[in-house]
Amino acid sequence: MNIRKRIEKLREEINNHNYHYYVLDEPLIPDVEYDRLMRELRELEEQHPELITPDSPTQRVGAEPVEAFGTVRHEAPMLSLDNAFSDEEVQAFHRRVCERLGLEDVEYTAEPKLDGLAVSLRYEGGVLVSGATRGDGYTGENITQNVRTVPSIPLKLRGKGIPPVLEVRGEVYMTRSGFEALNARQRKAGEKTFVNPRNAAAGSLRQLDPRVTAERPLAIYCYGVGVVRGWTLPERHSLMLEQLKAWGLRVSDEIRVVRGVEGCLRYYRDMQARRDKLDYDIDGVVYKVDLFSQQDALGFVSRAPRWAIAHKFPAQEALTRLLAIDIQVGRTGALTPVARLEPVFVGGATVTNATLHNEDEIHRKDVRVGDTVVIRRAGDVIPEVVSVVRERRPPGAAPFKMAGRCPVCGADVIRNEGEAVARCTGGLFCPAQRKEAIKHFASRKAMDIEGLGDKLVDQLVERGLVNNVADLYSLTQEQLAGLERMGEKSAANLIAAIENSKETTLARFLYALGIREVGEATALSLASHFGNLPALMEASEETLQSVPDVGPVVAAHIHAFFRQAHNREVIERLQQAGVHWPDLQVHRATDLPLQGKTFVITGRLDTMTRDEAKARLQALGARVAGSVSRKTDYVVAGEEPGSKYDKALALGIDILDERALSDLLQS
Ligand code: IVH
């Protein structure tokens, strides 16, 4: 084949892989194979520089650094959006839309509102010719050389009917995982770290040297168009987005068409519930009237369209004052510094405590008592101190120093080489560790003793009624009824719950023991490997390491746990008190019926919880994954399944409903 043809063929192949990888999220080939194609293309182009074209996939990082960005005038202004902060404001928006259109109801496209940087991309003849920031909406900065380095921005569009001029608009952002990795890299290199993914994306896109931008993990989602020549737009915004996707532009797969205000609000709540699971930050959702004819009829007010609105999530960051740094002692003795704060409303709730992670983090962020700090509260995640406003530091604020003794029991504090965590050496003599061990034992995924809450455990330990988990089983109703906030009835209920917990499974029991590094999955693995407790207790470290999921560190923890006379005694007492479980038949991993099969669960199940379904599938040898890919064998879809369901459909993966799952588990 002649060289020119081979080069063209390689470019086409590479572009096609980019499309499958970035736009469809379904890579066709492994990375090494992709790298091989790129290498071949690079070599051929090096030998034949006359054949290099600017839209070749090798030419993403081309230009030299610039002194300053030029400006670009937006042919069609880049507008902004009005904001709604409550359901009522969205209802008012919908009412205005309906009134103006003289309609009862309207369909909207609902989209995630990405927290990044708006860009405009201009394609002429299908080739990317310029990229610009939003600027003031009328003129932006020319960042063409930088947008070219973003892998998910195609240098050339694909497919049929590409318009001669197409300006695409979208949000450039940084994934959270990319942000963490970038900050780790910056830290290592002694360079400044970024406060959040948005700032990191903005800083990266506005680098004068495109080679720096190319190193940053940026991505794009497209959500609209500006000037278009030679294309009659489809009837709907949603269809337009589909066409953009077909031309190779990356469009979020969280976008839905919804009806009326109920549809909008349902979408909002769904996204709000799932936002922490996304790998990128969103600060709300956007509703856009779907039919272009209706958009045109509605028009604009000043700088925002009447046909769209941003429905913002409550702010996740706020400023407040750090009153004190307390040390909390965890179940394994880990000492966690906790920030006591002047109460502040953030992320939809009032926050008074936030985690500071560990000593090193405090020093890295240079957090001192008295400081004004940025607090972040994202969904169910524990609020954290993000950074300090140095300008507002009161005079005399002293750097933090970790205590040398446990604040609860006074035992020595040690910090092992290479570990970030300082630990209390008091073990179960430390009342704090004792309390945490009991709370863990009683928790839902362990022995599941309903009604045995944190406050109650604190009281039981403080009054000396319970010193270890075995003592729970000799508590009497009279003893309980004497506690604060405990009536006869709740005391009786708790006794019944404790009684109930005696019937359990080996996996739950192992997890409940709170052996270090033995989480739910490892406990399950151990249970199905050994089948009974004595076999596990006598296993050598070597044998333990043959269990899937168990490495040398975990094996050492398990082995050490069962060598301690104190632990064996507690286990014996628990069994004497009547705690029991059925022994399992030991299957070798390869005998298990679902061995080698990967499942993903989505939606709500009625007859069991998702955790339960997961545990039961795992017990049969299946792997249960968090996201759908080509490697997924089955997707279990309950009520109101999420995007995993759509993805399964798109990939042609077998879908099981709850009924089919039950049948499978029973057979
Ligand atoms: S549409 C006329 N859609 O939010 C419509 N904007 O507050 C203009 N943004 O400047 C924008 N996600 O940077 C639109 N799905 C989305 C968006 C989105 C994020 C940003 C964009 C815009 C700002 C307006």
Image (spheres, rainbow, N blue to C red):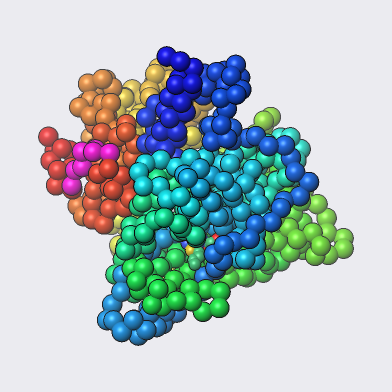
Picture residue at 51% right of the left edge, 18% below the top:
40
Q: Which residues are magenta?
A: 651-657
Asked if residue 461 shows in the view, the reply is: no
The spot of residue 163 in percent (x, y) is 42, 50
Picture residue at 18% right of the left edge, 48% below the top:
658
Q: What quarter of the picture does the C terminus occupy?
A: top left
Q: Is residue 142 left or right of residue 572?
A: right
Asked if residue 344 shows in the view, the reply is: yes
Asked if the stretch drawn in magenta spans residue 652, the answer is yes
Query: Of residues 458 and 105, which is closer to you in this image?
Result: 105
Query: Of residues 80 and 258, which is closer to you in this image?
Result: 80
The spot of residue 394 in percent (x, y) is 83, 65
The spot of residue 3 in percent (x, y) is 49, 17
Picture residue at 38% right of the left edge, 22% below the top:
547
Asked if the stretch drawn in magenta spans residue 56, the answer is no
Q: What quarter of the picture does the N terminus occupy?
A: top left
Q: Quadrant of residue 91?
A: bottom left
Q: Is residue 239 above or below residue 421?
A: below
